[in-house]
Amino acid sequence: MSKKVIITAAITGAVHIPSMSEYLPITPEQIINEAVAANKAGASVVHLHARNKENGQPTGSPEIMKEIVEGVKSKCDVIIGITTGGAIGMTSEERLAAVPVCKAELASCNAGSVNFCFSPIADKIKDPKYDWEIPFVKNTYKVPFANTFQGMEDYIRIMSENGTKPEFEVYEVGMLSNISYFVKKGLLKGPVYIQFVLGVMGGLPATVDNLLFLYNTAKKVLGEDFIWSCAAAGKDQFDITTAAMILGGNVRVGLEDNLYISKGVLAKSNAEPVLKVKEIARLLDREAATPDEARKILFS
Ligand code: KMH
Ligand code: ZN
Protein backbone atom coordinates (compact mmCIF):
# COMPACT_ATOMS: atom_id res chain seq x y z
CA MET A 1 0.00 0.00 0.00
CA SER A 2 1.31 3.45 -0.91
CA LYS A 3 1.81 5.61 2.15
CA LYS A 4 1.25 8.66 0.02
CA VAL A 5 -2.27 9.64 -0.92
CA ILE A 6 -3.11 11.86 -3.87
CA ILE A 7 -5.82 14.27 -2.78
CA THR A 8 -7.75 15.79 -5.67
CA ALA A 9 -9.86 18.88 -5.11
CA ALA A 10 -12.84 19.07 -7.48
CA ILE A 11 -13.43 22.79 -7.26
CA THR A 12 -16.84 23.63 -8.72
CA GLY A 13 -18.20 21.00 -11.15
CA ALA A 14 -21.30 21.19 -13.31
CA VAL A 15 -23.90 19.79 -10.95
CA HIS A 16 -24.35 22.23 -8.08
CA ILE A 17 -26.05 25.53 -8.83
CA PRO A 18 -25.18 28.94 -7.32
CA SER A 19 -28.44 29.02 -5.34
CA MET A 20 -27.29 26.03 -3.29
CA SER A 21 -24.25 27.69 -1.71
CA GLU A 22 -22.77 31.15 -1.70
CA TYR A 23 -19.36 29.48 -1.44
CA LEU A 24 -19.53 27.71 -4.81
CA PRO A 25 -16.83 29.35 -6.95
CA ILE A 26 -18.13 30.86 -10.17
CA THR A 27 -15.76 33.36 -11.80
CA PRO A 28 -12.31 32.41 -13.10
CA GLU A 29 -10.78 34.46 -10.30
CA GLN A 30 -12.77 32.60 -7.64
CA ILE A 31 -11.99 29.21 -9.21
CA ILE A 32 -8.27 30.07 -9.45
CA ASN A 33 -8.12 31.25 -5.82
CA GLU A 34 -9.99 28.17 -4.62
CA ALA A 35 -7.67 25.85 -6.57
CA VAL A 36 -4.55 27.54 -5.23
CA ALA A 37 -5.85 27.43 -1.65
CA ALA A 38 -6.84 23.77 -2.03
CA ASN A 39 -3.30 23.02 -3.21
CA LYS A 40 -1.89 24.85 -0.21
CA ALA A 41 -4.18 22.79 2.04
CA GLY A 42 -2.82 19.51 0.63
CA ALA A 43 -4.39 18.80 -2.76
CA SER A 44 -1.85 17.69 -5.34
CA VAL A 45 -4.44 17.65 -8.16
CA VAL A 46 -7.25 20.05 -8.95
CA HIS A 47 -10.15 19.01 -11.18
CA LEU A 48 -11.55 22.05 -12.96
CA HIS A 49 -14.77 23.04 -14.68
CA ALA A 50 -15.55 26.46 -16.16
CA ARG A 51 -18.66 28.52 -15.49
CA ASN A 52 -20.19 31.55 -17.12
CA LYS A 53 -18.73 34.56 -15.31
CA GLU A 54 -22.03 36.40 -14.99
CA ASN A 55 -24.48 33.72 -13.96
CA GLY A 56 -22.50 30.63 -12.95
CA GLN A 57 -23.89 28.34 -15.64
CA PRO A 58 -21.50 25.49 -16.56
CA THR A 59 -19.79 26.18 -19.88
CA GLY A 60 -17.42 24.34 -22.18
CA SER A 61 -15.79 27.61 -23.24
CA PRO A 62 -12.12 26.86 -23.99
CA GLU A 63 -11.27 30.54 -23.45
CA ILE A 64 -12.61 30.55 -19.90
CA MET A 65 -10.96 27.21 -19.11
CA LYS A 66 -7.66 28.53 -20.48
CA GLU A 67 -7.92 31.63 -18.31
CA ILE A 68 -8.48 29.41 -15.26
CA VAL A 69 -5.70 26.94 -16.11
CA GLU A 70 -3.16 29.69 -16.76
CA GLY A 71 -4.16 31.52 -13.60
CA VAL A 72 -3.68 28.40 -11.47
CA LYS A 73 -0.39 27.52 -13.19
CA SER A 74 1.00 31.00 -12.58
CA LYS A 75 0.43 30.62 -8.84
CA CYS A 76 1.32 27.03 -7.93
CA ASP A 77 2.57 23.74 -9.36
CA VAL A 78 -0.53 21.67 -8.63
CA ILE A 79 -1.43 19.03 -11.24
CA ILE A 80 -4.29 20.34 -13.33
CA GLY A 81 -7.06 18.09 -14.55
CA ILE A 82 -9.72 19.67 -16.73
CA THR A 83 -13.15 18.25 -17.25
CA THR A 84 -14.47 16.88 -20.49
CA GLY A 85 -17.74 16.01 -18.75
CA GLY A 86 -19.23 19.35 -19.67
CA ALA A 87 -22.86 19.49 -18.72
CA ILE A 88 -25.64 17.07 -19.63
CA GLY A 89 -26.70 17.72 -23.21
CA MET A 90 -23.43 19.31 -24.44
CA THR A 91 -21.94 17.86 -27.64
CA SER A 92 -18.60 16.00 -27.67
CA GLU A 93 -17.07 18.90 -29.61
CA GLU A 94 -18.07 21.32 -26.86
CA ARG A 95 -16.83 18.96 -24.15
CA LEU A 96 -13.48 18.40 -25.88
CA ALA A 97 -12.77 21.95 -27.01
CA ALA A 98 -10.55 22.87 -24.05
CA VAL A 99 -8.25 19.82 -24.37
CA PRO A 100 -6.04 21.07 -27.26
CA VAL A 101 -6.21 24.62 -25.93
CA CYS A 102 -5.11 23.84 -22.36
CA LYS A 103 -2.93 20.74 -22.86
CA ALA A 104 -3.42 19.97 -19.17
CA GLU A 105 -1.67 17.05 -17.50
CA LEU A 106 -5.00 15.30 -16.85
CA ALA A 107 -8.52 15.45 -18.25
CA SER A 108 -11.57 13.53 -17.17
CA CYS A 109 -12.75 10.84 -19.56
CA ASN A 110 -16.17 9.49 -18.68
CA ALA A 111 -16.01 5.73 -19.12
CA GLY A 112 -19.49 5.02 -20.44
CA SER A 113 -23.05 6.26 -20.72
CA VAL A 114 -25.13 6.55 -17.59
CA ASN A 115 -28.13 8.39 -16.24
CA PHE A 116 -26.64 11.27 -14.25
CA CYS A 117 -29.65 12.80 -12.62
CA PHE A 118 -29.75 15.64 -10.14
CA SER A 119 -33.23 16.96 -10.78
CA PRO A 120 -34.26 16.55 -7.08
CA ILE A 121 -32.20 19.70 -6.41
CA ALA A 122 -35.12 21.62 -7.97
CA ASP A 123 -37.40 20.63 -5.05
CA LYS A 124 -35.04 22.18 -2.51
CA ILE A 125 -34.58 25.59 -4.16
CA LYS A 126 -37.50 27.87 -3.43
CA ASP A 127 -36.04 31.12 -4.70
CA PRO A 128 -33.49 30.52 -7.48
CA LYS A 129 -30.89 33.21 -8.09
CA TYR A 130 -30.78 32.67 -11.89
CA ASP A 131 -33.37 31.64 -14.48
CA TRP A 132 -31.24 28.85 -15.96
CA GLU A 133 -30.84 26.89 -12.71
CA ILE A 134 -34.14 25.00 -12.33
CA PRO A 135 -34.53 24.01 -16.04
CA PHE A 136 -30.86 22.94 -16.00
CA VAL A 137 -31.24 20.51 -13.09
CA LYS A 138 -34.69 19.27 -14.24
CA ASN A 139 -33.29 18.44 -17.68
CA THR A 140 -31.14 15.68 -16.13
CA TYR A 141 -34.35 13.70 -15.42
CA LYS A 142 -34.88 13.39 -19.17
CA VAL A 143 -31.44 13.38 -20.76
CA PRO A 144 -28.77 10.73 -20.11
CA PHE A 145 -25.04 11.40 -19.87
CA ALA A 146 -23.91 10.01 -23.21
CA ASN A 147 -20.41 8.55 -23.57
CA THR A 148 -20.47 6.14 -26.51
CA PHE A 149 -17.56 3.94 -27.61
CA GLN A 150 -16.96 6.27 -30.56
CA GLY A 151 -17.02 9.22 -28.18
CA MET A 152 -14.62 7.59 -25.71
CA GLU A 153 -12.25 6.66 -28.54
CA ASP A 154 -12.27 10.29 -29.75
CA TYR A 155 -11.63 11.59 -26.23
CA ILE A 156 -8.74 9.15 -25.69
CA ARG A 157 -7.18 9.98 -29.07
CA ILE A 158 -7.43 13.75 -28.69
CA MET A 159 -6.02 13.59 -25.17
CA SER A 160 -3.13 11.46 -26.33
CA GLU A 161 -2.38 13.91 -29.20
CA ASN A 162 -2.20 16.73 -26.65
CA GLY A 163 -0.08 15.02 -23.99
CA THR A 164 -3.02 14.77 -21.58
CA LYS A 165 -3.60 11.64 -19.52
CA PRO A 166 -7.22 10.51 -19.26
CA GLU A 167 -8.69 10.18 -15.80
CA PHE A 168 -11.48 7.65 -16.28
CA GLU A 169 -14.62 8.51 -14.35
CA VAL A 170 -16.31 5.21 -13.47
CA TYR A 171 -19.89 5.29 -12.22
CA GLU A 172 -20.84 1.69 -12.98
CA VAL A 173 -18.96 -1.60 -12.99
CA GLY A 174 -19.38 -2.29 -16.73
CA MET A 175 -17.35 0.84 -17.44
CA LEU A 176 -14.24 -1.08 -16.34
CA SER A 177 -14.74 -3.42 -19.32
CA ASN A 178 -15.01 -0.36 -21.57
CA ILE A 179 -11.60 0.84 -20.36
CA SER A 180 -10.15 -2.65 -20.78
CA TYR A 181 -11.42 -2.69 -24.39
CA PHE A 182 -9.38 0.43 -25.20
CA VAL A 183 -6.31 -0.99 -23.44
CA LYS A 184 -6.58 -4.18 -25.54
CA LYS A 185 -7.09 -2.08 -28.67
CA GLY A 186 -3.73 -0.44 -27.95
CA LEU A 187 -5.14 3.06 -27.47
CA LEU A 188 -4.16 3.29 -23.81
CA LYS A 189 -0.87 2.68 -22.10
CA GLY A 190 -0.83 1.49 -18.49
CA PRO A 191 -1.13 2.36 -15.79
CA VAL A 192 -4.58 3.75 -16.48
CA TYR A 193 -5.93 6.23 -13.97
CA ILE A 194 -9.42 5.61 -12.66
CA GLN A 195 -11.70 7.76 -10.54
CA PHE A 196 -14.52 5.71 -9.00
CA VAL A 197 -17.46 8.08 -8.61
CA LEU A 198 -20.10 6.67 -6.28
CA GLY A 199 -23.45 8.05 -5.25
CA VAL A 200 -24.61 9.67 -8.49
CA MET A 201 -28.36 9.13 -9.09
CA GLY A 202 -28.23 6.65 -11.97
CA GLY A 203 -24.88 5.11 -11.00
CA LEU A 204 -23.68 2.82 -8.20
CA PRO A 205 -24.75 3.94 -4.72
CA ALA A 206 -22.04 5.14 -2.35
CA THR A 207 -21.44 2.05 -0.21
CA VAL A 208 -18.26 0.35 0.92
CA ASP A 209 -19.50 -2.89 -0.71
CA ASN A 210 -19.74 -1.10 -4.06
CA LEU A 211 -16.31 0.43 -3.67
CA LEU A 212 -14.86 -3.04 -2.99
CA PHE A 213 -16.80 -4.46 -5.93
CA LEU A 214 -15.34 -1.83 -8.26
CA TYR A 215 -11.82 -2.21 -6.88
CA ASN A 216 -11.85 -6.02 -7.07
CA THR A 217 -13.37 -5.98 -10.56
CA ALA A 218 -10.79 -3.46 -11.74
CA LYS A 219 -8.05 -5.80 -10.52
CA LYS A 220 -9.57 -8.68 -12.49
CA VAL A 221 -10.31 -6.71 -15.66
CA LEU A 222 -7.23 -4.50 -15.81
CA GLY A 223 -4.74 -6.91 -14.25
CA GLU A 224 -3.41 -4.51 -11.61
CA ASP A 225 -2.16 -2.01 -14.20
CA PHE A 226 -4.13 0.91 -12.84
CA ILE A 227 -4.02 3.69 -10.27
CA TRP A 228 -7.24 4.58 -8.57
CA SER A 229 -8.95 7.28 -6.66
CA CYS A 230 -12.44 7.57 -5.28
CA ALA A 231 -15.04 10.31 -5.06
CA ALA A 232 -18.52 10.16 -3.59
CA ALA A 233 -21.35 12.56 -4.30
CA GLY A 234 -23.12 14.19 -1.38
CA LYS A 235 -23.25 13.24 2.27
CA ASP A 236 -21.25 10.02 1.90
CA GLN A 237 -18.15 11.85 0.69
CA PHE A 238 -16.04 11.46 3.81
CA ASP A 239 -17.15 7.90 4.73
CA ILE A 240 -16.35 6.57 1.29
CA THR A 241 -13.09 8.46 0.82
CA THR A 242 -11.99 7.18 4.25
CA ALA A 243 -12.77 3.62 3.14
CA ALA A 244 -10.82 4.26 -0.08
CA MET A 245 -7.78 5.39 1.89
CA ILE A 246 -7.97 2.29 4.11
CA LEU A 247 -7.91 0.22 0.90
CA GLY A 248 -4.80 2.09 -0.27
CA GLY A 249 -6.53 4.31 -2.81
CA ASN A 250 -6.38 8.01 -3.54
CA VAL A 251 -9.26 10.40 -2.94
CA ARG A 252 -11.18 13.28 -4.43
CA VAL A 253 -13.14 15.79 -2.38
CA GLY A 254 -14.39 19.32 -3.04
CA LEU A 255 -17.46 21.41 -3.72
CA GLU A 256 -18.11 19.70 -7.07
CA ASP A 257 -19.09 16.56 -5.18
CA ASN A 258 -20.32 17.80 -1.81
CA LEU A 259 -21.17 21.30 -0.59
CA TYR A 260 -21.10 20.33 3.11
CA ILE A 261 -18.22 19.89 5.52
CA SER A 262 -20.44 18.09 8.07
CA LYS A 263 -24.15 17.46 8.55
CA GLY A 264 -26.01 20.70 7.80
CA VAL A 265 -22.85 22.83 7.67
CA LEU A 266 -21.81 24.28 4.33
CA ALA A 267 -18.10 24.13 3.50
CA LYS A 268 -16.83 27.68 3.11
CA SER A 269 -14.08 26.68 0.72
CA ASN A 270 -12.53 23.72 -1.09
CA ALA A 271 -9.60 23.88 1.32
CA GLU A 272 -11.92 22.78 4.17
CA PRO A 273 -12.71 19.29 2.81
CA VAL A 274 -9.08 18.93 1.69
CA LEU A 275 -7.88 19.64 5.24
CA LYS A 276 -10.48 17.27 6.67
CA VAL A 277 -9.50 14.37 4.42
CA LYS A 278 -5.81 15.12 4.97
CA GLU A 279 -6.36 14.81 8.72
CA ILE A 280 -8.20 11.50 8.26
CA ALA A 281 -5.24 10.35 6.11
CA ARG A 282 -2.82 11.31 8.86
CA LEU A 283 -4.78 9.28 11.40
CA LEU A 284 -4.58 6.34 8.97
CA ASP A 285 -0.83 6.82 8.72
CA ARG A 286 -1.02 8.10 5.15
CA GLU A 287 0.50 11.34 4.01
CA ALA A 288 -0.74 13.75 1.33
CA ALA A 289 1.44 13.48 -1.78
CA THR A 290 3.02 16.67 -3.07
CA PRO A 291 2.33 17.50 -6.73
CA ASP A 292 5.72 16.10 -7.72
CA GLU A 293 5.16 12.92 -5.75
CA ALA A 294 1.74 12.62 -7.38
CA ARG A 295 3.35 13.15 -10.81
CA LYS A 296 5.65 10.18 -10.14
CA ILE A 297 2.69 8.00 -9.16
CA LEU A 298 0.47 9.04 -12.06
CA PHE A 299 2.84 9.49 -14.97
CA SER A 300 5.80 7.14 -14.55
N1 KMH B 1 -21.01 17.14 -15.45
C1 KMH B 1 -21.25 15.80 -15.24
C2 KMH B 1 -22.47 15.27 -15.73
C3 KMH B 1 -16.46 15.14 -15.33
O1 KMH B 1 -16.02 16.14 -14.83
O2 KMH B 1 -15.97 14.59 -16.30
C4 KMH B 1 -20.16 14.85 -14.96
C5 KMH B 1 -18.82 15.39 -15.00
C6 KMH B 1 -17.71 14.50 -14.81
O3 KMH B 1 -18.63 16.53 -15.23
ZN1 ZN C 1 -16.04 17.13 -12.95
Image (cartoon, rainbow, N blue to C red):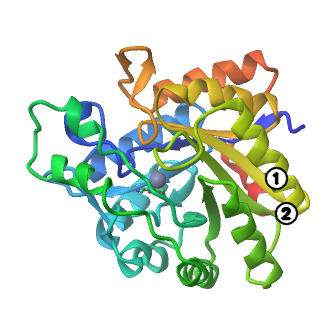
Q: Amino acid at mark 2?
A: Leu
Counting the numbered discs, the total is 2
Which image quarter is the C terminus in? bottom right
Mark 2 vs mark 1: give the one in front. Answer: 1
Q: Residue at x 41, y 62 (%)?
A: 70
Residue name at image x 69 percent, y 55 percent: 173
* Mark number displayed over residue 222: 2
**Residue shown at 71%/31% (left/top)?**
208
Tag 2's secondary structure?
helix
Q: Quadrant of residue 180?
A: bottom right
127, above or below 189, in the image: above
Element type at mark 1: helix
Q: Is residue 80 above or below residue 92?
A: above
Out of 268 and 184, give the one closest to the viewer: 184
- The residue located at (44%, 33%) in the rendering is 258
Residue underneath mark 1:
217
